[in-house]
Image: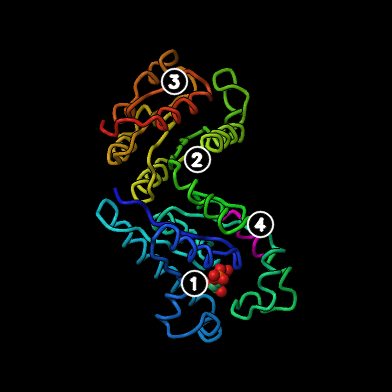
C-alpha cells in the first residue's frame, strides 16, 4: 500500500517550511506549503489577504484548500503513487474541522517549540500579520497556549524541536513514521472509572487508564489515540473516521452497547483493520444480559476479566500483527 503523506504542523517559526524542504531532499518526496498555495490562488501575500479580506476569509480559504487536498489524499490511498510532504499554516489545526482534514491528509507531525525560540526567530519578520503588535512575545505565548490542545489532539508524531539540529528533527520524524497508528475507543461510563461500582471496575480512575496507554505508546514507539464517548452515534462517527485517517487497528470497549448495539457492530464490520473488543470485568460471570456480545463477532479477539491490563494485552495483540479478515 502507498505510504501516507506527511503533514507538518506547529506554531509560526517552528520550522515547518525549512524542515519540509530538507525532508523533501532526504525522503525524495515533493513538498507543498499550503500558505504558498493560498497566496498563489489568491494572487496576494498572506499579509495582503489579512489586510484586504480579513482573517475570517483567510480561515475559510484555508479550510477549503485543506478539504480539497484531504479529498485527494483519501481517493489516492490504496493506489500507486508517491506521497507528499505538506507544510501547513501555524493556525490550521485550530478549527476542529481542519483537525479532521489534517488527519485525513496524512501522518500529522507537530513541531513543538518554545515561545522564546519563536520570538527570537521572528522578531524582525514582517510577514506574519498576527505578530505585528506592540508585544509579540506576549502574543506568541498567549496564542501558543490557546492552541496547545488543538496541536496535540491531531498529532501522530510530536517532536520537541528546541535544541535539536534539523538532522535530529528529521531522524525523530522518520522514527515516528515507523510506528503503528492505533485507536482505543471507550464507550459509555468508562470515563466513570474509579467512581462507578468499584468492586467490579476497581479504584483507578479514567486518567490512570489514559496514562497507562500513553506509557505503552511511548515504550513501544507507536501512536495510540484514545477516544471516549457515552453516545452511540458519536462512537459510530469515530469508527467511520478511522476509515479515512490511516488508523491501523482498533481496541474497543463498547461498554453496555456491547450487548445490543447492532449499529456499532455494523460500523466495526465496515472497517477492515484488525479490531479487539475489551472488557475490564469478566462479562461471562455477571448478569445474563452481559453474556451476549453483538460486537465481538466482528472483532478478531475478545479480552475480558483482566482489569485495565486487558487494554495493554489488546494493544500487544494488534502490534503483533493480526489477520485483518473477520
Ligand atoms: C498563521 C500562521 C502563518 C499563516 C498566517 C496565520 C497562524 O503560517 O498561515 O499568518 O495563525 O499561526 P506559518 O505558521 O507558516 O507562519
Dots 1 and 3: beta carbons under 8 Å?
no
Q: Magenta segment range?
A: 143-151
Please identify the quarter of the rendering in which residue 162 is found.
bottom right
**Residue where numbered disc 4 is placed:** 162
Dots 2 and 3: beta carbons under 8 Å?
no
**Is 81 covered by the magenta stretch?**
no
Between the C-alphas of marks 1 and 3, the distance is 46 Å
Horizontal placement of 245 versus 138: left or right? left
**Residue where numbered disc 1 is placed:** 59
Foreground: disc 1 or disc 4: 4
Up-down relation of residue 288 to residue 251 (above or below): above
Between the C-alphas of marks 3 and 4, the distance is 43 Å
x then y, percent, for residue 121: 66, 70
Graded by Cα atoms within 10 Å as few (under 14), some (14 to 19) or many (20 or more), the crowding at tag 2 reads: some
Q: Residue at x 50, y 40 (%)?
A: 226
Q: Which mark is residue 304?
A: 3
**Residue where numbered disc 2 is placed:** 226
Dots 2 and 4: beta carbons under 8 Å?
no
Q: Earlier in the sequence, mark 1 or mark 4?
A: 1
Q: Earlier in the sequence, mark 3 or mark 4?
A: 4
Q: Residue at x 58, y 35 (%)?
A: 215
Badge 1 marks a residue whose secondary structure is: helix
Amino acid at each position: 500500500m502507498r505510504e501516507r503523506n506527511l503533514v507538518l504542523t506547529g506554531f509560526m517559526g517552528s520550522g515547518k517550511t525549512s524542515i519540509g524542504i530538507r525532508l523533501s531532499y532526504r525522503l525524495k518526496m515533493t513538498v507543498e506549503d499550503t500558505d504558498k498555495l493560498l497566496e498563489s490562488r489568491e494572487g496576494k501575500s498572506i499579509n495582503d489577504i489579512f489586510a484586504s479580506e480579513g482573517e475570517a476569509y483567510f480561515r475559510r480559504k484555508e479550510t477549503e484548500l485543506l478539504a480539497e487536498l484531504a479529498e485527494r489524499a483519501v481517493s489516492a490511498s490504496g493506489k500507486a503513487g508517491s506521497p507528499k510532504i505538506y507544510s501547513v499554516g501555524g493556525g490550521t489545526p485550530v478549527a476542529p474541522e481542519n483537525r479532521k482534514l489534517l488527519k485525513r491528509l496524512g501522518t500529522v507531525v507537530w513541531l513543538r517549540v518554545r515561545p522564546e525560540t519563536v520570538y527570537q526567530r521572528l522578531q524582525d519578520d514582517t510577514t506574519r500579520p498576527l505578530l505585528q503588535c506592540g508585544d509579540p512575545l506576549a502574543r506568541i505565548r498567549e496564542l501558543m497556549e490557546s492552541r496547545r490542545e488543538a496541536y496535540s489532539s491531531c498529532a501522530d508524531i510530536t517532536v520537541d524541536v528546541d535544541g535539536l539540529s534539523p538532522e535530529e528533527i528529521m531522524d525523530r520524524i522518520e522514527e515516528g513514521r515507523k510506528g503503528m497508528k492505533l485507536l482505543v475507543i471507550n464507550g459509555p461510563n468508562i470515563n466513570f472509572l474509579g467512581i462507578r461500582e468499584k468492586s467490579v471496575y476497581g479504584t483507578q480512575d479514567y486518567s490512570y487508564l489514559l496514562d497507562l496507554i500513553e506509557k505503552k505508546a511511548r515504550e513501544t514507539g507507536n501512536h495510540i489515540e484514545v477516544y471516549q464517548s457515552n453516545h452511540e452515534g458519536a462512537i459510530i462517527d469515530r469508527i467511520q473516521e478511522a476509515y479515512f485517517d490511516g488508523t491501523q487497528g482498533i481496541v474497543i470497549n463498547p461498554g453496555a452497547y456491547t450487548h445490543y448495539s447492532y449499529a456499532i457492530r455494523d460500523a466495526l464490520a465496515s472497517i477492515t483493520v484488525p479490531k479487539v473488543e475489551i472488557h475490564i470485568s469478566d462479562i461471562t460471570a455477571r448478569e445474563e444480559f452481559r453474556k451476549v456480545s453483538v460486537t465481538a463477532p466482528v472483532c478478531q479477539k475478545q479480552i475480558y476479566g483482566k482489569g485495565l491490563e486487558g487494554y495493554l494485552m489488546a494493544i500487544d495483540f494488534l502490534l503483533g500483527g493480526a489477520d485483518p479478515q473477520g
